[in-house]
Image (cartoon, helix red, strand yellow):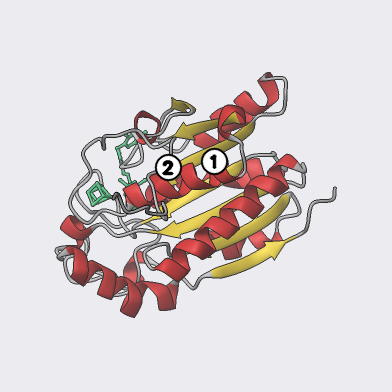
Amino acid sequence: MTEKKELVYTKPKLKLGYGWGHCPGCHHPIVEKLVCEVLEEMDLARRAIGVAGVGCSFGFFASINIDGANCAHGAAPAVATGIKHALYGKPLVFTIQGDGDCAAIGGGYVLNAASRAEKITIIMVNNANYGTTGGQLAPTTIMGQVTSTTPHGRNTGQGYPIHLPELLVGMQGVAFTARAAPFTPAGYRRAKSYLKTAFQRQLDEAGLTFVELLSACPPNWHMTPLEAIQWMEDSMLPEYPEGIFKDSGGEK
Ligand SMILES: Cc1ncc(C[n+]2csc(CCOP(=O)(O)OP(=O)(O)O)c2C)c(N)n1
Ligand code: SF4
Ligand SMILES: [Mg+2]
């Protein structure tokens, strides 16, 4: 007799069956899966359009089965704005950007989209360095962190880390900001809940929404995947705490 088994876990339907070449221990695929689950659970896949910048999230929309576009490094909030305004039917529009993309070259795009209260969601994948190009210092690199351009560790000569979810709190056009670290089950659940709220606030036209997700980059950190997770717990989380920093609700 065949034993009847209950299905308790399965790959999201939106996640395509192949990756596009992340390093072992990279957390970008966690973010891909998380976005797929949120879109499926909110039944938004057919309404969603994503915009990826340049960096290790470049292939995001080759890995998940929704409409997506790529654009120049940093420009994703501007391209997302254009898509949002050009299309009828109020699509759900979100960007997926690295920390260098979002906080360095694209910082001006983020702030101006926020100031215009664009009804888009920005997802920033923070791995505390420029992963794609060999692990250089990013604005999010934490104090003391060794990168290829700070071989003795970041010091005050290179300034201090940027905390975008906290920084955006003061902007009137921003409806929701949060940060989560989806590499533990609890962090993953938090990330899902924050992303769902961000998407809902966008659909309610409350303003710009922003979610930062902490992510490991083991090769550029010169760590094994497990050491990378330990470093995130010991060093990254104290600098970048999880939580909701602003939630203005659905009105406006
Ligand atoms: C206008 C422009 N400047 C610089 C580059 C080179 N470049 C490609 S990816 C990258 C860094 C990406 O870092 P980040 O945004 O943090 O993404 P990650 O690779 O860490 O996921 C840079 C500087 C580029 N592609 N375009
Ligand atoms: S360089 Fe870092 S962020 Fe890029 S794929 Fe490899 S581990 Fe991931
Ligand atoms: Mg990065």
Question: Which amino acid type corresponds to the residue marked 2 in the rendered image?
Answer: Pro
Q: Position of residue 12 (x, y in %)?
A: 42, 42
Q: Position of residue 172 (x, y in %)?
A: 76, 54
Disc 2: residue Cβ within 8 A of ligand 2's nearest atom = no
> Furthest residue to the front?
1
Image point 23% across, 67% down: which residue?
228
Which SS class for mark 2? loop
Q: Residues within 10 Å of mark 2 (few under 14, many from 20)?
A: some
Disc 1: residue Cβ within 8 A of ligand 2's nearest atom = no
Q: Position of residue 178 (x, y in %)?
A: 58, 61
The answer to whether the residues at label 1 and label 2 have Cβ atoms under 8 Å apart is yes
Image point 22% across, 61% down: which residue?
147
State whether residue 76 is above or below residue 2.
above
Q: Which residue is mark 1?
A: 40
Question: Which amino acid type corresponds to the residue marked 1 in the rendered image?
Answer: Glu
State whether residue 177 is above or below residue 199.
below
Q: Is residue 248 visible?
A: yes
Q: Is residue 98 visible?
A: no
Left or right of 55: which side holds 228? left
Left or right of 124: which side holds 176? right
Q: Residues within 10 Å of mark 1 (few under 14, many from 20)?
A: some
Left or right of 46: which side holds 150? left
Q: Which residue is mark 2?
A: 12
Q: Nearer the viewer, residue 248 or 154?
A: 248
> Furthest residue to the right?
252
Whichever of callouts 1 and 2 sits on the residue coming sooner in the sequence is 2
Q: Nearer the viewer, residue 65 or 157?
A: 65
